[in-house]
Image: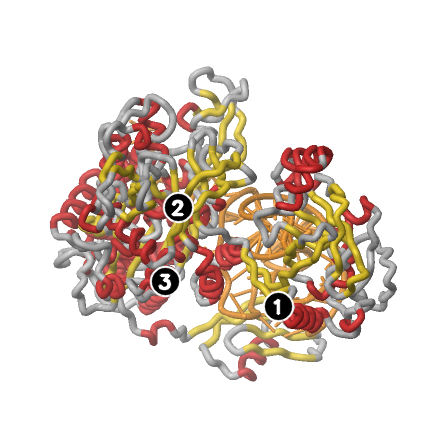
Amino acid sequence: MSRFNPLKADAHWQRIWDESQTFAARDDSPKPKSYVLEMFPYPSGRIHMGHVRNYTMGDVLARYRRMKGMEVLHPMGWDAFGMPAENAAMEKHVHPGGWTRQNIATMKAQLKRLGFALDWSREIATCEPDYYGQEQALFLDMLAAGLVYRRESAVNWDPVDMTVLANEQVIDGRGWRSGALVEKRKLNQWFLKITQFADELLEGLKGLDHWPDKVRVMQENWIGKSQGLQFAWSLSDGGSVEVFSTRPDTIFGASFIAVAADHPIAQAAAARDPDAVKFIELCKQGGTTAAELETQEKLGYDTGITATHPFDPAWKIPVYIANFVLMEYGTGAVFGVPAHDQRDFEFATKYHLPIRRVVSDGDKTDPDFVDAEAYSGPGTIVNSHFLDGMDVEDAKREVIIRAEAGGWGKGTTVYRLRDWGVSRQRYWGTPIPIVHCDQCGAVPVPRDQLPVVLPEDVAFDIPGNPLDRHPTWKHVDCPSCGGKAVRETDTLDTFADSSWYFIRFASQPKDKPFDRAMAEQWLPVGQYIGGVEHAILHLLYARFWTRALKHIGMLDIAEPFAGLFTQGMVTHETYKSVEGKWLSPDDVRDGKEIATGQPITVGRTEKMSKSKKNTIDPEPIVDQYGADATRWFMLSDSPPERDLAWSEAGIEGSWRFVQRLWRLVDGIEEGEGNDVALDRKLAQTIAGVAVDIEALQFNKAVAKLYELVNAIEKAKPSASRSNAIRTLVRLVSPMTPHLAEEAWAAMGESGLVANADWPSYDPALLVEDEVTIAVQVNGKLRDTLVMPKGSDKAVVEAAARANPNVLRILDGAEPKKVIVVPDRLVNLVA
RNA sequence: GCGGACGUGGCGAAAUUGGUAGACGCACGGGACUUAAAAUCCCUCGCCCUAUGGGUGUGCGGGUUCGAGUCCCGCCGUCCGCACCA
């Protein structure tokens, strides 16, 4: 009996798939279309296990859908712009383009070795002018439609990466890539008007039934919609201050106004009062991490100004500068209602401001609020003149109506979402197709001059943007007046590149970003698979970009990804030497460090990372075990949304299974006669595996296939058995495609198993004719009965009563009650 | 603090949505084959006990039910996201 040799088989079948263009998606196919997409990789150098897991899942689905008769678009490309290329350029003195293209070549070869059913004819790399040039065209389309603007703004400046970051890219006050503390700077920046779509993006989430709730909630929170009243208080210095509140119903509980440290009122106070300056400085020192915010005291500085209550000219409250008010949110000023907001409560307690109850808490209606913390729940409005007796929601409406009627306020919706700042002071990105002219201002590059190509001759010996200091590149004539002008030297945030690549996969004409009809044939992506780390950034930007294109009338697709699946990480044990240094799995054998023979300590199983040295390079694994065993392991054991712990034993197990499959095929004996039990098992497996793959529950599909293999191995030769083996080859082909092709050919089947149909079965076989019925006494299992399916209740009850175990336990007693669940169980209650 | 997910053998996990808990895999142990090893095959495998049986068992404490991993109430713990959001 032979062994399956992946070294030979993998390359052989990969070449055949390649040559016959097996997985090229046909645009003109009459079959129903299906778009399966995994998040395209950044070409960092080599693929890692996370890629293998991600792409294996998508591949199984793509291959399965092909077998089910669908025309599947399953493309691959490269998110090829970005900073690591520039860092490599600085460290290793290579060109970012050369470095990136070399990485792409390496990683493409690695992906090919895993036998993914990808349509490589549609491969795109975002760093090539035929891609980013079309992106520049889209940028200009958005500009023309008023979705792009430029303004000076305080931006998040990453001093290590020397570039601006979007709000989404600042995590706990630090750059998402560099981890450096982000500074505020004023710069002229290009913005995309994502806020114009805030409500659409929020509402659209409701229809995304095939997205994880977690991701929908995260996006919902990020968009952060609040409805309330924006209104003005007139001030004792003759001015006024605009505040925003979601609780206008508590307006009669106001006891102070608080403004942000960089609010104009604070600035004005600073101009006349040195103590105010000191306080503002203090505010700016405050940290922004979770822990710091939690412990940070609410501090205020009384400006001496008072504000007049809009409903009572005689009612004055003080105006404070406060460290907890953010200039970026709402109007940068709030009115404080200590009784019904915990933050205001703490502030009022510290500065001895009145705490007035205006919402009843159960029976408590007393205006003197003496509770230990603020009450923010529902209730009836009290101590509030004309609002008394209303519930909170009615009172909100009433105050808004009166404010609007009185002309001093307006019902408003405020979003946390900010416009998307896309300017990056980097070289390795899509050049922003704009020319700055002293006479004409910012002028779009004419369409016939696109793409604006990145110059190749750049140097990275000093920090900063090489485009900015390039001797010639930026100096051009103004497209409008012909006078001397300079190019925009900022490039687009690379998240722009990944915001529409899935459209370009569906349609990639030379002369435009995409063909509308062609793109609409494939879109939306039916199943998108990737890491949860993109839950906000990439997925929100892509949703926005798609809606922007719809708004412009370029594409009639509202949501780009109908189905989303976020897969778990691949993890591995961590090891430390006696000296406490991280050790790679390669340095460890039998609990000892190979180099020193010293015992090692096994740490937590964690996400594979270079810093903890617990990575496993997929390539040697594929060398040793082949693509199929590697793929099989990626699908086994752990549910795909959870983490998968890589282990030597696990991959060995997968390897054994691949060989077991091969032995079945290799040792196939044509038998006579039917084995109905095996026929049933086969039918159940065909049906069950299909359900599991469709639900992306690969671990369950794997378990069912093991069961079938166990059953076939135990079965005696019969026509059923040889049929089961032939069918098994098709069932495993999405997971272990090389072995399946090899087996398919060995069994004398024609064509490729990749083009075979998913097996069918007789539905009658799914119906068991015998069932095992549990026999319980007082809810405890005492025995089981095997009976014909659909047996009469009375018959089943009689059989249960006659059961020796039951007789012994009942000991002659008559059951008080008998529950018979047809085909499931009998419970005798004594 | 807010939001979300989760908690089942030594480990990864399953359990048709209230009906035989632990399918399937990994590991461990025993055996067969072999001069030996590898490979392969067979058996055992939640825990406890007086063992062809019985008790107990799905983070903890209650509850509903003939019957709870699943439903309800109250806790504890782990992970993830957001956060002075007005």
**Residue that mark 3 sits on:** A694
Q: Position of residue A222 (x, y in %)?
A: 52, 53
Q: Callout 3, which amino acid?
A: Glu
Name the residue: 44% across, 25% down: A588
**Residue A344's x, y, as percent?**
74, 51
The quarter of the rendered structure image containing the C terminus of chain A is: bottom right
Mark linked to residue A190: 2
Mark 2 residue crowding within 10 angstroms, few (<14) / some (14–19) / many (20+): many
Callout 1: few (<14), some (14-19), or many (20+) C-alpha neighbours within 10 Å?
A: some
Taking the image as shown, residue A222 lies to the left or right of residue A433, namely right
Q: Is residue A445 above or below residue A471?
A: below
Q: Is residue A379 left or right of residue A580?
A: right
Tag in front: 3 or 2: 2
Hey, what amino acid is under mark 2? Trp
Give how far apart the Cα atoms at labels 3 and 2 are: 42 Å
Mark 3, Cα crowd under 10 Å, few <14 / some 14-19 / many 20+, is some
**Residue B17 lies in what quarter of the image?**
bottom right
Q: Residue at x 22, y 31 (%)?
A: A456
